[in-house]
Image (tube, grey):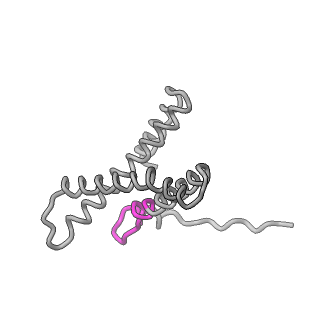
Amino acid sequence: MPLIALLIVLSNGVWWVLLPYYNAFFVATVFHGLQYLVIVALFHAKDQMALPGNEHGLVAHSLRFYAMSLALAYGLFYCLPMGYRLAGFGVTESMFLVVTVINLHHFIVDAFIWRVARDSKNRRIVEASTPVAAPSPTV
């Protein structure tokens, strides 16, 4: 396992030791989201710069991505709960529906981040690990 993986686990563990558990949970959640935003922004900017007729640089594509992310966050955290309330759901049900939508969004973002192209390092990692068959249950 690469040393960077151990470093990530240890740095995440520091939050749980140095901060009260509620603050650690909040900090871990925020930094996890920021980590995803940085990774996806880099993928997005790289993909956009490779398009024919591209006239913008890395910074312009990254700023546009973050502006779109901010608009999506406004829609998810402010407009969507109000929409559910207008549809007749209570506050609790609205919040559960928002959490569901956010988890679906997280699933889509994971698929984007961990896409496995033929020349990707991720493909080599996936292909290197061969699944082991579970033993047959004995009765």
95 versus 115 height, above or below: above
Magenta span of residues? 109-125
Q: Which one is in front, 46 or 91?
A: 91
The part of the image, by quadrant, that contains residue 46 is bottom left
Q: Going by the image, does 47 lie left or right of 39? A: left
The residue closer to the viewer here, 118 or 23, is: 23
Q: Position of residue 9 (x, y in %)?
A: 48, 41
- Front residue (pair 132, 56): 56
Q: Is residue 105 left or right of residue 34?
A: right
Q: Position of residue 92 (x, y in %)?
A: 61, 49
Image spot of residue 81 (x, y percent): 50, 53
Residue 75 falls within the magenta-colored stretch: no
Residue 116 percent location from the top left of the image: 40, 67
The residue at 34%/54% (across/down) is 71
Residue 94 or residue 34, whichever sits in front: 94
Please determine whether, in this image, residue 94 is positioned above or below residue 115: above
Taking the view exactly as shown, the residue that stands out farthest to the right is 139
Please state if 67 lies on the left or on the right of 1 as rendered.
left
Quadrant, the C terminus? bottom right
In the image, residue 122 lies in the stretch drawn in magenta: yes
Q: For the point 51% across and 63% down, which residue is it? A: 129
Residue name at image x 29 percent, y 61 percent: 44
**Numbered disc total:** 0
